[in-house]
Amino acid sequence: MLALQYIRENKDILLKGLEKRNFKQPELIDQIIELDKDRRTQQAELDHHLSKTNKLTKDIGSLFKSGESIKANLLKQKTTALKNETKALQEALQKTSLTLFDIRTQIPNVPHESVPSGNSETDNEEIFRSGDIPDLGNKALPHWELAVKYDLIDFELGNKITGAGFPVYKGKGARLQRGLINFFLDQNTAAGYKEMQVPHLVNEASGFATGQLPDKEGQMYHVQNDDLYLIPTAEVPLTNLYRDNLLDFSELPVCLTGYTPCFRREAGSYGSHVRGLNRLHQFDKVEIIRIEEPKNTMKALDQMVEHVKSILEGLQLPFRILRLCGGDLGFTSALTYDFEIYSAAQKRWLEVSSISTFNDFQAERLKLRYRDATGNKKSVHTLNGSSLALPRIVAGLLENFQNLDSISIPKVLIPYTGFDNIN
């Protein structure tokens, strides 16, 4: 959520930035500015009334003590009228504040100056590419056929137990999955991220704080009786560990990593592009998050990008990095880099990671501040990234490393899987 001071002082910059997102309601910015002006006026009037009431109350007490009860009772009549006015002011202030808050939640983050303009993913900017795309010939199989051939993943069994989008991993498929999780966590902890195990269900306040609610409410599974939500990513519980906190600058940066299953409804998608592991309702992901002083944000973002690059290079998967355009940028993000690996069997790019900085957008919702070296309270910046999402990594490994009668395992994974091929 954008800070009110920023909106007041940077209206033109804000509107120009929101143009990159093709934001259709610029009039909301004027409404916010006017409501904020009303709120501050009402707050000043309320403070004046409360101060006046306190003074009258003290005067009444002094008059009663000095035996001047007639004067005291006259002042009491004034305080009664003043209290009625105060109540009306409090109600008006509450109404204005709620309306202001509701409109603020509808405003997305301001894109970073480097974000290209554009309407959709076709306008994203490729900034890096690594690895050679293997030529598998005409007999290459997609991962959903390889999964059946080598008895690695059972999509029909998952459909029987739960429904489409909930696969069952079997044998070496399950061991590959577990090996990847441990490999990713080891890579992250070696890079300085502290491993955490967090809940897989969160409350509404947590979903709001990181921006999933109300923006993505329809994409989240909701447990109605308990009013809890299944997490769409570990970013939500990891970041909320610091909700309502005041950190000291010496505690920054905060660098965390965690593995969780993730749950997304992903309704309305059909076809070969979502077949197999390409899009699931439940999947495993290892996440990294950072909480930073604003001056270190871009350096931290670059470090996260380089870290994920090193993991994909270790897996020997061909990949590219895209800088997302304004029209494809997530609601809370100021700048996002997507990592995509190439699937040689499907002959298409598959997204496996998004790394984003939110600047202080999440911090406003989280009410997360830090005290700088001079003792002033300031908003932190938050960042997060997939490191990595497993389904499409598994798909890429199965497809790109397939042989005629086996699937090879990258060297870095062999200590984690306990086998060097699948046959």
Image (cartoon, rainbow, N blue to C red):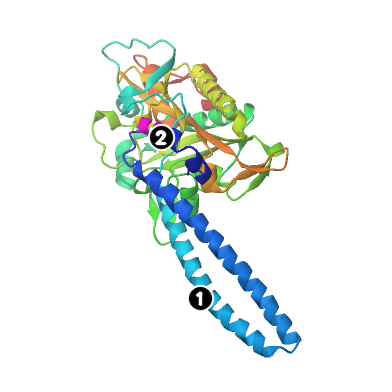
Q: Residue at x 66, y 44 (%)?
A: 247
Within the image, what quadrant is residue 140 found in? top left
Spatial CA distance of label 2 from label 1 is 70 Å
Residue 170, disc: 2
Q: Is 84 displayed left or right of 283 in the figure? A: right
Residue at 61% over, 30% down: 295
Horizontal and vertical percent position of residue 119: 31, 29
Which is more toward the observer, 248 or 74? 74
Say whether disc 2 or disc 1 marks the residue closer to the N-terminus: 1
Query: Mark on residue 84?
Result: 1
Main secondary-structure element of the magenta-colored stretch: helix
In this orientation, does residue 237 appear?
no
Element on which disc 1 rests: helix
Residue 385 locus on image (x, y percent): 50, 32
Amino acid type, label 2? Lys
Q: Is residue 98 above or below residue 148?
A: below
Q: Check disc 2: other Cα within 10 Å, few if <14, some if 14-19, many if 20+.
A: some
The amino acid at mark 1 is Asn
Tell whether 374 sits left or right of 242.
right
Secondary element at image label 2: loop
In the depicted structure, whether residue 65 falls above or below residue 373? below
The residue stretch that appears in magenta: 15-21
